[in-house]
Image (cartoon, rainbow, N blue to C red):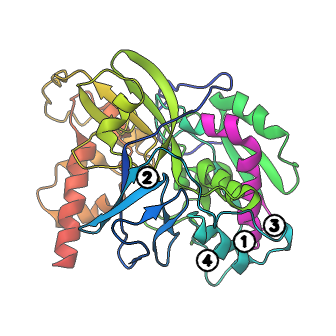
Amino acid sequence: MSNTFTGGVFPDYSELKRKTPVTPADPESVTLRIPDGYSTRVRGGETVFIGTVLADGDGAALLSGISGTVSLSGGFVTVKNDYLGRLSPALHPAEKRISEMSGDELRDALHVMGVPTPSVPSKKPTECIIADCCEPDTGTVSAAATVFDRAEAVAGGLRIFMKLTGTAKGYLAVPRHMHACADELSGHADGRLVKIKTVSDKYPQHEPHMLVSALFNLEINPLTDTGKAGYPVIPAEICAAAFDALAKGIPYTSSYITVSGIGKTSGVYSVPFGTEIKRLPALCGSADGGIVFTGGEMTAKEVSDGEYTSPGVFAVSVAAEKAPEKPEAHECTDCGRCAAVCPVRLLPSLIYGCRDTGKAAKLGAEYCISCGCCDRVCPAGIELRAAISEMKKEMKKEVTA
């Protein structure tokens, strides 16, 4: 029996049965928000290359994923594509063998290549590092494509993060339905320090707290970063990016995104960060028109103008121009299905019925991870996730007021 966690649902997952080509997307421009506290490293009119540092701060450096000309406006940096695909001359593999680099050297090298590093405990050792090879939603194959295309890099990146944090154990967490991906990784796991662990097919198995629960039967407060608790969970994509950065000198400037649209079957595309999301389906061959969404079946969210790809955007889809009307929601029947599937053991129907934030807080609304399991099983058609998310926003406003 696969390792599992409490709650969750069993949706129909898509899976790549074999290695599928990942198609590069080449946008007209990329626009990236300059994070708070970062300093801009380029000027308007300047020519930049793939991997050029656009802004820098305490986190990973902000890099350009295309070559072209810079413009700056209102906290954003835009690069207009010259379609030459020129690489920054500053890019190169690590000068030392990775095994010979200290933790600080690894962290600095990853920083300049745009690769984020995990949060770790300050006063106790890290128990292990977990490479998350689970799909973040249904109908997406981005994680599977990463493993098929870059299995060596995923396992190699896990070892880099183990070295960086001084951790002796690493796990490649793969859902049961992605057995072909586990086979792909098997040649890169020694079974001693790095092991493949099969976990449940349930959603949201990808969520870090659910992975820790499934692997170790350990529950961590949903408001506490699993890394701070000693169990950093790192997406397979980030692991692969770390290996490619140090071993090959490839910067982390793009991600694999499952794109599906009108008149075109789903495909996986390597998309530079900062690509306008609404233009992505057409860029990948979909018919024009329609409503654009990010996320999969469980987390779909309609996209507004001026939204751009970034780490964490894993799927983009297009629906018909006129979305089907949702059935009218009925009164809660107190069936308890939402409570049964909630992975953090909340009582969504009771939180939904609260008329003030004080009662919602007492019921633990702040612990909601917005996975949408409650919406999926509600026979009354109540949009519980949206209601609780709004309640959380109100609670946050009251705290900061």
- Could you tell me if residue 346 is visible in this image? yes
Camera-nearest label, 1 or 2: 1
Q: Is 380 covered by the magenta stretch?
A: no
Q: State how far apart marks 1 and 2 are (Cα).
A: 31 Å
Q: Position of residue 363 (x, y in %)?
A: 29, 60
167 vs 267, left or right, is right
Residue lying at the far top of the rendered structure = 263
The answer to whether the residues at label 1 and label 3 have Cβ atoms under 8 Å apart is no
Magenta stretch secondary structure, dominant: helix
Crowdedness near tag 4: few (<14), some (14–19) or many (≥20) residues, C-alpha within 10 Å: some
177 vs 101, left or right, is left
Q: Secondary structure at mark 1?
A: helix
Identify residue for label 1.
Answer: 164
314 vs 19, left or right, is left
Q: Quadrant of residue 112?
A: bottom right
Q: Position of residue 181 (x, y in %)?
A: 70, 33
Q: Which residues are magenta?
A: 145-169
Identify residue for label 2.
Answer: 344
Which residue sits at x=31%, y=37%? 279
Q: Secondary structure at mark 4?
A: loop
Name the residue nearer the viewer: 160 or 44.
Answer: 44
Q: Any mark on residue 272, and which?
A: none
Camera-nearest label, 4 or 1: 1
Q: Any mark on residue 121, and which?
A: 4
Q: Quadrant of residue 47?
A: bottom left
Q: At label 2, which amino acid type do we have? A: Val
Q: At label 1, which amino acid type do we have? A: Leu
In which quadrant will I find the C terminus?
bottom left
Which residue sits at x=85%, y=40%? 187
Q: Any mark on residue 98, and which?
A: 3
The answer to whether the residues at label 2 and label 4 have Cβ atoms under 8 Å apart is no
Above or below: residue 337 compared with residue 61:
above
